[in-house]
Amino acid sequence: MMIMYFREIMLGKRSGSFIRQILKGLSLIYLVLIKMRICGYKHGFLRKKKLPVRVISVGNLTVGGSGKTPTIIEIASLLRDTGKRVGVLIRGYHSKYERCGGVVFDGKSWAQETQGHNKRSDNHQQVQNYKDTSVSPEDAGDEACLLSENLRGIPVLAGKNRWASGRYAIEEFGCDTLLLDDGFQHLKLYRDVDILLHDVSIPQAGLRLFPEGVMREPLSSMKRAQIIILTHTNMATDITPYEDVIKGLNSRALILQSIHLPIYFQQGMNSYPLTLIKGKTILACSGIGSPESFEHTLRQFEPNKIISLRFPDHYQYDSACLTKIEEMAKGTDMVVTTEKDMIRLAGKDINCSLFFLKIRLEIITPNWQENLLRCLCSG
């Protein structure tokens, strides 16, 4: 696919000197535009909106996945367990709610506690479709649905207008802390804390500005973050160079290391141990931002062979794709996909043995909870 072809060029995995020169020129134009935008917000030419509660952003500097969704799950759960009334705000890319807003999950486990927070404001005119029901990936997006599946007791709201979603979360659900998913570049909303994820599995050749590379902003933008979490650290032989770069740019930031920890395989309502794929031939099917990390994880459990089938991030599986999966699955023992892909594949008519890998983000830095909570809740 064309998208995957350009992604490999951006990561430096495919030659294409002529195309790269064109992309390099476009990157210079892009750099000027993002510098103007950042300066506009910094000096007040562009106005920020502020919500009357603590706002914590979780984002990254790269195009594609770096582990934002499992990080949101981990941090939201941690804050909930300390007594915070947390809400998650997500854009819901390419979904119905992206345009008009909607509640993906209402946090029913403490809904009774928030009955006093029922005042409405004019802001609700901007959030038309808020309702108390389960929604589909077409309604809210795959990541929003994945969050709602994993965050019991925490409201999840989707919509491009994160300020309007935040006001609704405060007034209807009594939230006192809001997590802004993929919010590092969402400068129009004021945040108290910026958490920045940095994926150490990305090749150095890919750390060029988009579209020549996968960087949304220059590395110097790390200066804006109070917390920087290195992800996929088990895929790098030495983390020290990454930490040295960060400390040189932002000496005050809390730096944490993390891995994507596989837990089990699941099919339907049944879960299976990670040894399930040992010695088997599997088709690894994924439509995520970092398919390499998914396949790297699978290799740890010693399959006989991995056949890779990659689609672009957030890919909507149609009948032609399902047919391709079925054809490629012939001669394999099983098909394994990601939990996010399973959200999009659920309910599809696909004739093969399909499992997904359940993972969670695990922060491996000692005493991380104490240090993280101090940064999230102080000031």
Image (spheres, rainbow, N blue to C red):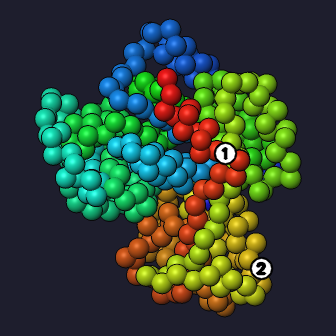
| 10 lies left or right of 41 | right
Residue at 56 percent of width and 32 percent of height: 375
Q: Between 43 and 115, which is closer to the camera in this rendering?
A: 115
Image x and y of residue 166, in percent = 31, 36
Image x and y of residue 248, in percent = 79, 25
Look at the numbered disc 1 and give the secondary structure of its residue. loop
The label number, if any, that marks residue 129 in the structure image: none
Residue corresponding to mark 2:
302
Residue at 39 percent of width and 15 percent of height: 47
Look at the numbered disc 2 and give the secondary structure of its residue. loop
Image x and y of residue 344, in percent = 43, 66
Residue at 49 percent of width and 23 percent of height: 379
Question: What is the spatial separation of the Cα atoms under label 2 and label 1, in whole angstroms?
Answer: 32 Å
User: What is the quadrant of residue 287 in the picture?
Assistant: bottom right
Q: Between 48 and 193, which is closer to the camera in this rendering?
A: 193
Residue corresponding to mark 1:
367
What kind of residue is marked 1?
Answer: Asn
Dots 2, 1 in contact, CB < 8 A: no
Q: Quadrant of the N terminus?
A: bottom right
Residue at 38 percent of width and 37 percent of height: 177
**Comparing labels 2 and 1, the label whose residue is closer to the camera:** 1
| 37 lies left or right of 22 | left
Q: Mark 2 or mark 1: which comes first in sequence?
A: 2
Total numbered labels? 2
Q: Between 152 and 202, which is closer to the camera in this rendering?
A: 152
User: What is the quadrant of residue 176 in the picture?
Assistant: top left
Image x and y of residue 262, in percent = 63, 68
Q: Dot 1, how many residues are within 10 Å of its Cα: few (below 14), some (14-19), or many (20+)?
A: few
In this rendering, the answer to whether 124 lies above or below 336 is above
In this rendering, the answer to whether 139 lies above or below 337 is above
Residue 30 visible? The answer is no
What kind of residue is marked 2?
Answer: Glu
